[in-house]
Image: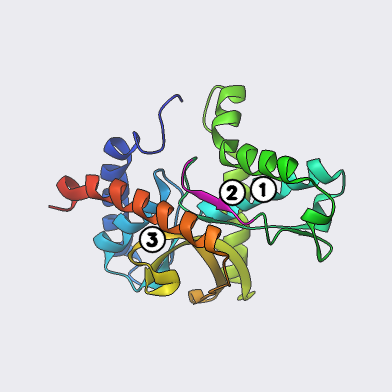
Amino acid sequence: PGMTREELIGINAGIVKEVCTNLLAHSPNTIIIVVSNPMDTMAFLAHKVTGLPKNKVIGMGGALDSARFKFRLAEALGCPQSDVDGMVIGGHSDKGMVPLIEKAARNSVKVSEFLSAERMQEVVEATKVGGATLTGLLGTSAWYAPGAAVSAMVQAIAQDAQKIFPCSALLDGEYGISGISIGVPCVLGKNGIERIVEVSLSDAEKTKLTESAEGVKKTNSLLDGVLA
């Protein structure tokens, strides 16, 4: 508690490297879902350590961030969360998250029909600090919501559900980004990531995603000693 996701890299990188190495030795065809922070960088590390195909290493962050986004949207709209559709892409960090507020909807009606621009921005900002807010309230890291997000992802893979989750995937040109793991919409099924979905983004959303990717690259550079 009290450490940023980026500050955790010195501790978690060694753990992730060891766990992935042992996991691969016993289950070479495994599908890995990474939860440890900084999550996008740890997913990238898992790719490097295991050499698994990019569809078999998945970062959880976007699924969790999107659940928090939908909660905040429902709260602002005064409606059931089941009425709300919304997604967060980008890095799993306070500065890196890109809540797609322009695309968020209540039963297919854009939330901008219900909320002012100021209220929508409040929802975005509350979403970005969701993890830190919970840590402050609990005195420890969040555990229930991440567990629920992972459970939903595992279920989609085990049942070959072909369900879309925003999750951290290794990109190779999608969204104009290559060589890093970052949150984007993905179809999950029996093979892990079945497809990366490229949705149309506004210029503002593209800029935010590009900035988020630069932040992830900067954090990834701290892995040099671990990968040596």
Q: Position of residue 62 (x, y in %)?
A: 54, 55
- How far is disc 3 from disc 2 in space, using C-alphas? 16 Å
Relative depth, front residue between 131 and 202: 202
Category of crowding for the residue at label 1, using alpha-carbon neighbours closer than 10 angstroms: few (below 14), some (14–19), many (at least 20): many
In the rendered structure, which segment of residues is drawn in magenta? 95-100
Tell me if I can see residue 53 in this picture: yes
Say which amino acid is labelled 1. Phe
On the image, numbered disc 2 is attached to which residue? 65
Category of crowding for the residue at label 3, using alpha-carbon neighbours closer than 10 angstroms: few (below 14), some (14–19), many (at least 20): many
- How far is disc 2 from disc 1 in space, using C-alphas? 6 Å
Say which amino acid is labelled 2. Asp
Labels 3 and 2 touching (C-beta < 8 A): no
Q: Position of residue 58 (x, y in %)?
A: 45, 62
Q: Is residue 13 above or below residue 154?
A: above
Relative depth, front residue between 26 and 116: 116
Numbered disc total:
3
Q: Is residue 67 left or right of residue 38?
A: right
Say which amino acid is labelled 3. Ser
- How far is disc 1 from disc 3 in space, using C-alphas? 21 Å
Q: Residue drawn 54% across and 74% down?
A: 197
Labels 2 and 1 touching (C-beta < 8 A): yes
Relative depth, front residue between 131 and 153: 131
Labels 1 and 3 touching (C-beta < 8 A): no
On the image, numbered disc 3 is attached to which residue? 181
